[in-house]
Image: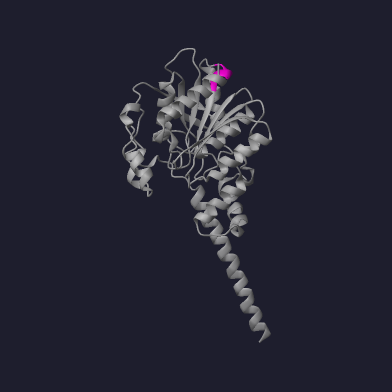
Amino acid sequence: MKKKLLIILSSIIFLGFVVYGVAGFYVAYSILKIDHTCGWHENSKPNSWSTKIDAHEYTNLSRSRLRDNFPTNEYHLEEWQNVYFPSREKGIQLNGWLFNYYPDRPIVVVVHGIYPNGKCKPESNLIASLLIQEGINALTIDLRNYGQSDIVSSYEDLGLKSYNDVLGAYDFLKKIGFESNSIGLHGISLGAVPVIFAANKEKDISAIWADSSLAEFSMVLQDEIARYGLSIEFGPAVSFFGKLLSGVDPIDLNPAEKLTNNQNYFFTHGDKDQRMLVRHYNYFKKYAEENKIKSEFWLAENSYHVDGMFKYPDLYAAKMRDFFETNLK
């Protein structure tokens, strides 16, 4: 009888470990597996992109209406250069759209978020247009594994490798004549992570804009696990398989700790963001205040994830103009 109970107990424990592992793998795989396309925006260009294409995909009615009614034609750009340049990590070729309209004026590298994504998405195109509107040049890029850049993995590296791609864009701009102190960075959602990491490596970059960024690994891990109806106890399994799949240790994903005292930052977030919760914005704000980081903050009212640029385009543009013109040459 005791032997039988022991077998049953061992089977239950074994089954528990299997379920734990499978759940951890599933969550990690679901988060990190990349769709290399740009989704509905695969064929979008700076003179043809539209928010109406995928407005129906947003289950939140407010977000859907915002994009369905957004006047994209007013923000189309007719002139750009299709450029290729190497990542600072050897062997990786990257693609971008260069909007070099104004001689002797600053330029900002615009970095997209997580899949399906790329420079083709409305967010990158709109930011480029708003910058041009304010007399600031722009370079929108495809990170590795996205768009027309080299595909080197099927899994997202969370910015822990692709920050080298941002540095590659920075090197490219210096090569074609821009001075270090005239190059700024703009990161959208997860794209803010490689932007912050790149700036940490290259201290001559003086102006960094982060829109709806995550701030700290344990918080985003808890947020993501909760989306799948699981408790934080599944965190170690998700982290283990995340490291296995991506080749990077997600525990290193702590952008707030990469902020420096000799650079300037601007953080913006939607106050109703349900994708990257507002507590990430608050974490950045508290960290910056405690560590005397030179930073500005704007919490966009009645806005969801990266919606501020669509809801308040003129205000967004004005804030970018003031920030980049103040901190770039």
Asked if residue 19 is positioned above or below residue 81 in the image, the reply reads below
The total number of labels drawn is 0
Residue 234 left/right relative to 79: right
Residue situated in front as seen by the camera: 284 or 118: 284
User: What secondary structure is the magenta-colored segment mainly?
Assistant: helix
Q: Residue at x 48, y 22 (%)?
A: 321
Direction front: furthest residue: 301
Above or below residue 100? Residue 281 is below
Name above or below for residue 295 compared with residue 272. above
Q: Residue at x 35, y 24 (%)?
A: 77
Could one spot residue 91 in this view of the protein?
no
Q: Is residue 321 magenta?
A: no
Q: Is residue 271 above or below residue 265?
A: below
- What x and y, as percent, mark residue 71? 32, 32
Give the x, y percent position of residue 68: 32, 40
Which of the 4 quarters of the picture holds residue 247?
top right
| Magenta stretch in the rendered image | 179-183
